[in-house]
Image (tube, rainbow, N blue to C red):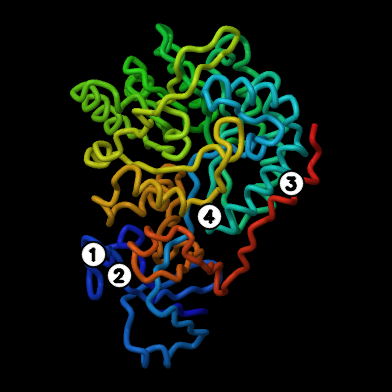
């Protein structure tokens, strides 16, 4: 056993009744509580308010005084793309246009063999583990010509990383391909590699209700849920989120459903958006926002294209793609934030760092106005969507994965994203070495 004393834990990451402000912290600006955490093996067995130093003298195991610094549970990446990561150097996105980037990665997908995906995804997993992630959900493009290598690579990695990072996979498919003869292949790969859920990126069209009905029937047959990319645009008429909620209710779909992006919700008539949010709540959909990638991709405008050119000169963005996070939170919808793409044609940067995602989400979505809630977007929110009870919490029974910051206050951490951090895994501190990007220089170029 190991007793870690004087850990300042965000209230959002504590079980009741410890998730209420007490003692040293300001309930509005510094919503944490100083606790002692006891670990046995790979699980937390006790959490209580920090006591006097003398109390540790009766403890039978090791004791470490953390000195009143911030401590988060292991964070969860609820939405990423390990099959695409680190392809930027060989297939960069020249203009960061959504459809251009999609085409670039589609062309690159002929290289996505099992070994190619394994190499890149393994680098990503070492990176996210070195930042403090202990669970990750990745979408894998799946169709007639792509997906087998990616699913096979992640099957290997899931076994290799067991006990460190819990890995879930989603079969991400084009609805066009699924409903034009590719559905059987997509379903077969999903079943063979035991994917957590079926995915896809529906587009507004008259057949959308029937398409969602069929997809839900296929998922029901497999006994799994859905995790969809929806409304990743600034088009007010894009209401795939609403259509998904209606389909869940119409089909009485029994499995979990998550919807990522949901950007167009922010540009719709407020009354219509409220109705959609009420449907989302009734249908039990988990909402995933991807602030970093969507702010990079959305709201891109250009001037007239010169003759012979596909793109004109860039113009300053006026809208940046955040969904209605505050309104969803107020409605009682489960929300989470993820990192999405990392160094591929959609976005040339990123580092699988959920603390970066958390800090930027607070800044960009004004979650400073809900600071006590805010850590939930990378802890308990994704844990609920991913169906991982105990994750995202520092509570009895939770995994003994902790991020120990050198900062003592949340506002210090939010002010300095590069705040040093250490990691507890089980009863010990663990190494946290970021892989060097130079390692990628030795990878095959074709």
Foreground disc of the pair 3, 1: 3
Q: Which mark is residue 133?
A: 4
Under circle 2, the secondary element is strand
Residue beneath label 3, please? 440
> Cα distance, mark 3 to mark 1?
46 Å
Mark 1 residue crowding within 10 angstroms, few (<14) / some (14–19) / many (20+): some
Going from the N terminus, do you reach mark 2 or mark 1 first?
1
Q: Position of residue 185 (x, y in %)?
A: 66, 20
Going from the N terminus, do you reach mark 3 or mark 4 first?
4
Q: Which mark is residue 33?
A: 2
At a point 45% along the width and 19% down the height, the residue shown is: 302
Q: Position of residue 233 (x, y in %)?
A: 41, 23
Residues marked 3 and 2 touching at CB (< 8 Å): no
Residue nearest the observer in this picture, 153 or 395: 153
Residues marked 3 and 1 touching at CB (< 8 Å): no
Under circle 1, the secondary element is loop
Against 71, residue 280 (above or below) is: above
**Is residue 340 among the parts visible in the rendering?**
yes
Residue nearest the observer in this picture, 302 or 370: 302
> Cα distance, mark 1 to mark 4?
25 Å
Going from the N terminus, do you reach mark 4 or mark 2 first?
2
At a point 46% along the width and 80% down the height, the residue shown is: 3
Residue beneath label 1, please? 20
Quarter holding the C terminus is top right
At a point 58% along the width and 46% down the height, the residue shown is: 167
Foreground disc of the pair 3, 4: 3
Under circle 4, the secondary element is strand
> Cα distance, mark 4 to mark 2?
22 Å
> Cα distance, mark 3 to mark 4?
22 Å
């Amino acid at each position: 056993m190991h007793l870690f004393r004087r850990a300042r834990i965000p209230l959002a990451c504590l079980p009741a009744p410890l998730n209420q402000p007490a003692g040293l912290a300001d309930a509005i600006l510094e919503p944490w509580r100083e606790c002692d955490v006891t670990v046995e093996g790979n699980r937390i067995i006790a959490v209580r308010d920090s006591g006097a130093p003398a109390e540790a003298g009766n403890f039978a195991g090791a004791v470490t005084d953390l000195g009143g610094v911030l401590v988060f549970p292991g964070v969860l990446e609820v939405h990423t793309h390990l099959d695409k990561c680190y392809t930027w150097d060989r297939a960069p996105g020249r203009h960061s246009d959504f459809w251009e980037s999609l085409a670039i990665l589609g062309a690159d997908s002929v290289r996505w063999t099992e070994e190619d995906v394994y190499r890149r995804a393994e680098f990503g997993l070492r990176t996210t583990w070195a930042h403090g992630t202990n669970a990750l959900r990745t979408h894998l493009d799946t169709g007639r010509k792509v997906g087998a290598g990616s699913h096979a690579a992640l099957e290997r990695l899931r076994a290799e990383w067991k006990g460190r990072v819990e890995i879930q996979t989603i079969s991400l498919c084009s609805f066009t391909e699924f409903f034009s003869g590719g559905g059987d292949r997509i379903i077969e790969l999903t079943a063979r590699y035991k994917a957590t859920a079926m995915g896809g990126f529906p587009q507004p069209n008259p057949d959308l209700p029937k398409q969602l009905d069929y997809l839900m029937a296929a998922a029901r047959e497999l006994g799994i849920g859905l995790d969809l990319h929806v409304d990743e645009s600034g088009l007010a008429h894009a209401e795939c989120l609403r259509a998904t909620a209606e389909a869940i209710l119409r089909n009485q779909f029994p499995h979990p459903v998550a919807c990522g992006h949901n950007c167009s919700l922010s540009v719709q008539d407020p009354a219509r958006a409220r109705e959609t949010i009420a449907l989302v709540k009734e249908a039990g959909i988990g909402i995933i926002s991807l602030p970093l990638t969507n702010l990079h991709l959305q709201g891109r405008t250009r001037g007239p294209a010169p003759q012979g050119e596909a793109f004109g000169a860039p113009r300053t963005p006026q809208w940046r793609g955040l969904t209605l996070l505050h309104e969803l939170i107020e409605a009682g919808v489960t929300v989470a934030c993820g990192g999405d793409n990392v160094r591929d044609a959609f976005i040339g940067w990123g580092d699988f760092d959920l603390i970066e995602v958390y800090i930027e989400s607070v800044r960009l979505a004004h979650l400073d106005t809900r600071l006590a809630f805010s850590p939930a977007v990378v802890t308990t929110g994704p844990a609920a969507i991913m169906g991982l009870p105990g994750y995202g919490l520092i509570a009895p029974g939770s995994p003994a994965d902790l991020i120990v910051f050198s900062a003592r206050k949340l506002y210090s951490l939010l002010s300095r994203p590069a705040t040093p951090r250490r990691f507890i895994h089980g009863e010990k501190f663990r190494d946290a070495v970021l892989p060097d990007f130079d390692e990628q220089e030795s990878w095959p170029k074709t």
